[in-house]
Amino acid sequence: MSAVIDVDDPADPRLDDFRDLNSIDRRPDLPTGKGLVIAEGVLVVQRMLLSRFTPRALLGTDRRLRELSADLAGVDVPYYRASAEVMADVVGFHLNRGVLASAPRPRELTVAEVLDGARTVAVLEGVNDHENLGSIFRNAAGLDVDAVVFGTGCADPLYRRAVRVSMGHALLVPYAWASWPADLETMRDNGFRLLAMTPNPQALTLAAAMEGLAGDRVAILVGAEGPGLTERAMRSSDVRVRIPMSRGTDSLNVATAAALAFYERARVAG
Amino acid sequence: MSAVIDVDDPADPRLDDFRDLNSIDRRPDLPTGKGLVIAEGVLVVQRMLLSRFTPRALLGTDRRLRELSADLAGVDVPYYRASAEVMADVVGFHLNRGVLASAPRPRELTVAEVLDGARTVAVLEGVNDHENLGSIFRNAAGLDVDAVVFGTGCADPLYRRAVRVSMGHALLVPYAWASWPADLETMRDNGFRLLAMTPNPQALTLAAAMEGLAGDRVAILVGAEGPGLTERAMRSSDVRVRIPMSRGTDSLNVATAAALAFYERARVAG
């Protein structure tokens, strides 16, 4: 069982992992590389405990400690127990989720590692919004996507807001940073068919494209809302696919568009 | 052509429609009913001009005036032209979209009006988050849903943030507030089959349910993230449907779940 340590001084240096969380230097993607991965709330902390991210400290209320007691049995990590007021003082704002965990950033997985055994992967280019990124991980987890590969211009999936919006799935769904666009060839060499999402009305519909590839490994390429995939990524793909849209509307949110592709893939190949 | 009126005094009373937009009393859903519907940005203003919401004033930069010139031809509404700084002073924060329009709230449509001619409607219960609500309108517009019906506990789709997230589609996709749950019977009397979304593994999959109803009018009932639909709404429905989920995950974001149902309906019945 983890040690429970009562803390009532917000200045206690043992709480430094959780200090001023809104401050920009807490971002784990800073060049210094010193950022920590922060999990917020019971559900996300539970998922961190199941993941390759090993917490080194927890800060939370007594109530959250009780909710997490089964999860923390056999885990060797200090739980700093504090009031909501002390927690707010430390993190710099009121935190209604009541518990935080901090984990050092482990080494990144390689593209080869995340492709191993995967049937469906999402490949993102230019998705630089943490909320969209978190949503994509949540959708990937629920809709049977095995891994996420990042091309250029993507935000860090371990940033606190992305982890929170992902409901912790950014810690569980394997991801890797690609050599771009060279690793698209790596994927093709591994038997993946590359599907590029586009609003182009000449493209195949999602349903038609997925039905043709039900037995294949598939990589679904998604670009940022607005610009979409670069021409380079488009040219490197095997099939261009579109979501049939009504009313002359031109786009959906990028995480929603990705969810529809994941859904269709799972429906046809599941 | 609309009158263009240059303004450089942020205290000018003609700009009162746009003053202190973050202040709570600007919400159009207040009991006083005095709130205005506010459109932000060129695209949303364009959609307002196409909608049943008639703007009574615009406030924007010269650049946005030029971008809107074709849309404003023949429209009789004053355009208060100001610098970004004056605009920020008026609205109370920096507004990077550069243009705003205000419209009085018209009468609400009735359920009968929005059902007329509709083949697919979304029915929402307890969706009280403006961002989710806005996303649902955006998804409805793009994925061929004809109207939205609100049961109890839903937020106002005309609140500024909902309109913005909807990309203006909250102004274009017809919606109505239902007598709840009595209007579920109204829908059934009008030939609609009522599909209730649930995580229950006993429910039919989306694909199976939609295939059985391709020729019918369909109402897709969606509840709030977390609690889902009430038992009362569940009991009033004809078919319970679920999204097949992987990894033991239990839910998607409510707007994403709705998008998958809209997509599947359009795929099968489109």
Image (cartoon, coloured by chain):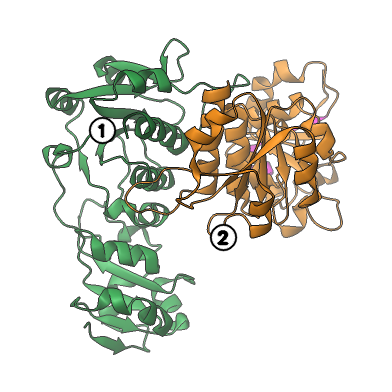
Chain colours: A green, B orange
> Residue A261: horizontal and vertical position, in percent?
40, 30
Asked if the residue at tag 2 contacts the one at tag 1, i.e. Cβ–Cβ closer than 8 Å, the answer is no
- Residue B84 colored magenta? yes
- Local SS, label 1: loop
Q: Nearer the viewer, mark 1 or mark 2?
A: 2
The CA span between labels 1 and 2 is 37 Å
- Residue A101 colored magenta? no
Taking the image as shown, residue B141 lies to the left or right of residue A18, namely right
The part of the image, by quadrant, that contains residue A188 is top left
> Residue B198: horizontal and vertical position, in percent?
53, 50
Q: Are the residues under marks 1 and 2 on the same chain? A: no
Query: Label 2 sits on what residue type?
Result: Pro
> Residue A46: horizontal and vertical position, in percent?
32, 66
Q: For mark 1, what is the residue?
A: A151
Count of residue discs: 2
Taking the image as shown, residue A63 lies to the left or right of residue B55, namely left
Q: Is residue B182 above or below residue A222?
A: below
Q: Is residue A119 visible?
A: yes
Graded by Cα atoms within 10 Å as few (under 14), some (14 to 19) or many (20 or more), the crowding at tag 1 reads many
Q: Label 2 is found on which chain of the structure?
A: B
The part of the image, by quadrant, that contains residue B112 is top right
What is the span of residues highlighted in magenta in the rendered image? B78-88
Taking the image as shown, residue B242 lies to the left or right of residue A261, namely right
Query: Label 1 sits on what residue type?
Result: Gly
Q: Is residue B31 above or below residue A110?
A: below
Graded by Cα atoms within 10 Å as few (under 14), some (14 to 19) or many (20 or more), the crowding at tag 2 reads few
Q: Is residue A2 above or below residue A232?
A: below
Q: For mark 2, what is the residue?
A: B227
- Which residue is at 39% across, 44% downward? A139
Q: Label 1 is found on which chain of the structure?
A: A
